[in-house]
């Protein structure tokens, strides 16, 4: 009996003196680098393990990833210098970061490259990818249910595919000021479905922008550049609430702009690389491309009425040559403004 009591007391003493193995020291900010001290870890997985919920992991060394990483808490991963400390994917895998239904996840100023793998999969209500660089890997692949709010801003993507295709609607995606490029001789795509869009300030060089058929969406696609001898704008969804405007659409091959829906897709007020508007055979489907920009800076559109201010400016320009930078367009086929041009203007003044 004494031995039993002694054992019980000994175990109670041990449990009081020794902390539980599950208890981890966590920090609001942790560092994956070669520095020693509290909050500094040489292993990227250790740094993620010791960061608090809603905390930040700073990358201060080059990282090599061999296996997928589960993310079960809201966290920001930010590089101290993305060019000096890249994240290299060392082998093919399903994804780099798998989000386990968390509130938010952010990648900031990160350079990730290699293996054509999807960097982010899984579910977070808010996903932000900012000021980062992706080369030969795909920043994000979404195929979950709904409730996504995704923002990609200021990123550079080189041969990097993006697919945001929730299975049902009520999702939002913002693509702002990103650079999408691929090497000559190849092409890539950005695919959306069931997602309302704000797409502005991007350059899509040799990229296709594809809106898949699904729930009715709203889309504002403006102030972007679509360039390259390949890469289409393909709208499979109903286009009544999808608007392409104030873009530079520099495409000249058959079927470059294709709409397969039953409504009318709005492509008014875009610059098509010429004062004459788009070449007819590049457009397929019921697309309204009227009122195109006559100049690259969008200062006047086809069909605009002349005003008294235009007349006053024309008078000042009498005898000056009309060139591609002139505000006046196609009043006559000669190269100077004369009195007949002024008569043409006055007839159009309201």
Image (spheres, rainbow, N blue to C red):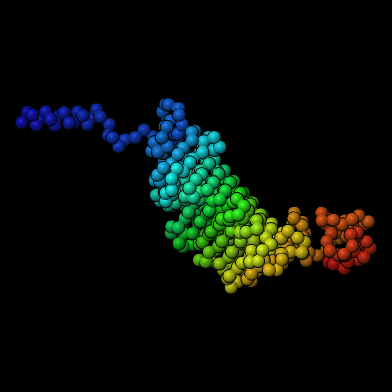
Q: Using the rendered view, name the quadrant where residue 51 is placed.
A: top left
Which residue extends farthest bottom? 262
Task: Judge left or right: residue 7 versus residue 281.
Answer: left
Q: Is residue 271 above or below residue 10?
A: below
Which residue extends farthest front? 185
Task: Judge left or right: residue 84 versus residue 336.
Answer: left
Task: Judge left or right: residue 269 versus residue 105.
Answer: right
Q: Using the rendered view, name the quadrant where residue 332 is placed.
A: bottom right
Residue 184 x/y as whole percent: 62, 52
Q: Is residue 62 above or below residue 257?
A: above
Task: Judge left or right: residue 51 versus residue 173.
Answer: left
Residue 188 x/y as whole percent: 56, 55
Q: Using the rendered view, name the quadrant where residue 219 is placed.
A: bottom right
Q: Is residue 84 above or below residue 239?
A: above
Would you say residue 245 is visible in this rendering? Answer: no
Identify which residue is drawn at 17% across, 31% down: 11
Residue 150 x/y as whole percent: 51, 52
Q: Quadrant of the N terminus?
A: top left
Would you say residue 292 is visible in this rendering? Answer: yes
Residue 331 x/y as whole percent: 86, 64
Identify which residue is drawn at 93% across, 61% down: 338
Q: Is residue 113 above or below residue 248?
A: above
Identify which residue is drawn at 22% across, 31% down: 15
Give the mark count.
Answer: 0
Q: Quadrant of the C terminus?
A: bottom right
């Amino acid at each position: 009996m004494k031995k039993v009591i002694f054992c019980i007391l000994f175990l109670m003493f041990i449990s009081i003196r020794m902390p539980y193995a599950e208890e981890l020291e966590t920090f609001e900010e942790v560092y994956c680098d070669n520095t020693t001290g509290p909050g500094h870890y040489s292993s990227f997985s250790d740094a993620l393990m010791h960061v608090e919920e809603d905390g930040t992991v700073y990358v201060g060394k080059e990282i090599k990833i061999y296996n997928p990483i589960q993310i079960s808490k809201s966290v920001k991963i930010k590089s101290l210098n993305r060019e000096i400390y890249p994240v290299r994917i060392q082998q093919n895998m399903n994804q780099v970061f798998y989000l386990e239904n968390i509130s938010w996840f952010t990648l900031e100023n990160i350079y990730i490259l290699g293996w054509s793998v999807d960097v982010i999969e899984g579910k977070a209500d808010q996903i932000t990818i900012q000021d980062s660089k992706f080369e030969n890997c795909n920043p994000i692949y979404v195929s979950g249910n709904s409730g996504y709010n995704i923002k990609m801003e200021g990123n550079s993507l080189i041969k990097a595919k993006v697919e945001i295709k929730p299975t049902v609607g009520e999702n939002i995606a913002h693509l702002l000021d990103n650079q999408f490029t691929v090497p000559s001789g190849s092409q890539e795509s950005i695919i959306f479905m069931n997602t309302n869009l704000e797409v502005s300030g991007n350059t899509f060089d040799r990229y296709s922008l594809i809106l898949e058929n699904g729930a009715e969406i709203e889309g504002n696609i403006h102030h972007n550049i679509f360039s390259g001898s390949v890469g289409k704008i393909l709208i499979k969804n109903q286009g009544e609430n999808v608007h392409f405007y104030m873009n530079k659409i520099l495409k000249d091959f058959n079927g470059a702009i294709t709409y397969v829906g039953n409504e009318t897709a709005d492509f008014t007020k875009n610059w098509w690389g010429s004062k004459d508007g788009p070449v007819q055979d590049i457009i397929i489907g019921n697309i309204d491309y009227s009122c195109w920009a006559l100049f690259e800076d969008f200062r006047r559109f086809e069909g605009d009425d002349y005003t008294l201010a235009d007349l006053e400016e024309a008078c000042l320009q009498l005898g000056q040559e009309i060139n591609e930078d002139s505000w006046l367009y196609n009043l006559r086929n000669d190269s100077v403004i004369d009195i007949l041009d002024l008569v043409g203007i006055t007839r159009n003044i309201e």
